[in-house]
Image (tube, rainbow, N blue to C red):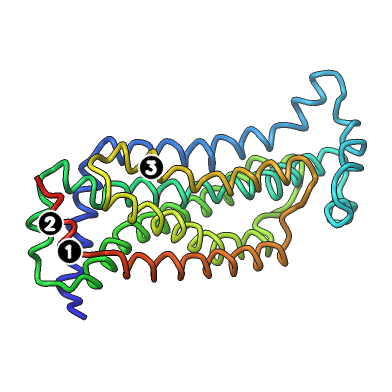
Amino acid sequence: MNLRAMRAIVRKDLKVLWQSKAVTVPLIVVPLIFLVVLPALAALLPSAAVQAGGPLAQIDRYLQQMPQGLQAELAGYDQAQKIVVLALVYFLAPMYLIIPLMVASVVAADSFAGEKERKTLEALLYSPTTERELFVAKVLSAWLPAMAVALIGFLLYSMVANLAAWPVMGRLFFPSGMWLALAFWVAPAVAGLGLGATVLISARVETFQEAYQLGAVVVLPILSLVIGQATGVMYFNLVLVMALGLSLWAIDALLLWLGGRLFRREELMARVG
């Protein structure tokens, strides 16, 4: 492989990404909301519940609708701690996965469709790389920022969760083993899912907005996980997270294989202009 040319493509894409406000603003604002603002608010839920007139006592009634495994996980906590752990460790876990998915989808949407809009695709296609090298470079250009945001966001989330919930928990309680698997096993696979689907779409549409809108469909499975956990259909535990990651990695491999098969320099050249 021509690693030097691939690195040049990745560096160029990352530079263009950093200079585009349309791309960078949502990549900063959305993770801050999901990984800083929401966990801080969730840590304040017990105090807010007490001030609101005592709905704190209703947590046990709600937990009776949850899976037995989740009830067992929370059995050793008091009422206030149950709310904090339920929100920060469990309910926000699937929402964390939206971050690498969103970042990968946004950057991948800009991967080829953005090149067309900037009129730089032709020069890219004449670069000294094979089709496989070009495709891999474009995939890395989206996957690396997604993982950087996801891992930095995980560190921020951990700090905010422990600091904001300290008055209730009285100790460091985050991250759990499930969250470590989520951040280092599932999040990279989710990023791969977003970029694998979106790069294929991006190479076949004309504008960044078209690619991003079509690529956003991949967020639906993640939203189903959010709904499933909130309604008690399932809950995130280490076994589920490991199995989810394995499934996503298998889908990623299929998408990358398909992308490599379908990617043709001649077709992209015919679309230039």
Residue receiving disc 3: 27
Mark 3, mark 2: which one is toward the viewer? 2
Q: Please report contact status of discs 1 and 2: CB closer than 8 Å, yes or no.
A: yes
Question: Which is more toward the observer, 105 or 263?
Answer: 263
Q: CA distance from mark 3 to mark 2?
A: 30 Å
Q: Residue at x 16, y 74 (%)?
A: 4
Q: Residues within 10 Å of mark 1 (few under 14, many from 20)?
A: some
Q: Position of residue 104 (x, y in %)?
A: 39, 52
Type of amino acid at the residue the image marks with label 1: Arg
Type of amino acid at the residue the image marks with label 2: Met
Q: Secondary structure at mark 1?
A: helix
Q: Residue at x 10, y 50 (%)?
A: 120
Mark 3, mark 1: which one is toward the viewer? 1
Q: CA distance from mark 3 to mark 1?
A: 30 Å
Q: Which quadrant of the structure image shows residue 167? A: top right
What number is the disc on residue 265? Answer: 1
Q: Could you tell which of marks 3 and 1 lies nearer the N-terminus?
A: 3
Q: Position of residue 86 (x, y in %)?
A: 76, 45
Q: Which quadrant of the structure image shows residue 30? A: top left
Q: Please report contact status of discs 3 and 1: CB closer than 8 Å, yes or no.
A: no
Q: Residue at x 40, y 48 (%)?
A: 103
The answer to whether 84 appears left or right of 186 in the picture is right
Q: Position of residue 7 (x, y in %)?
A: 20, 68
Residue receiving disc 2: 269
> In which quadrant is the C terminus drawn?
top left
Type of amino acid at the residue the image marks with label 3: Leu
> In which quadrant is the N terminus drawn?
bottom left
Q: Residues within 10 Å of mark 2 (few under 14, many from 20)?
A: some
Q: Could you tell which of marks 3 and 2 lies nearer the N-terminus?
A: 3
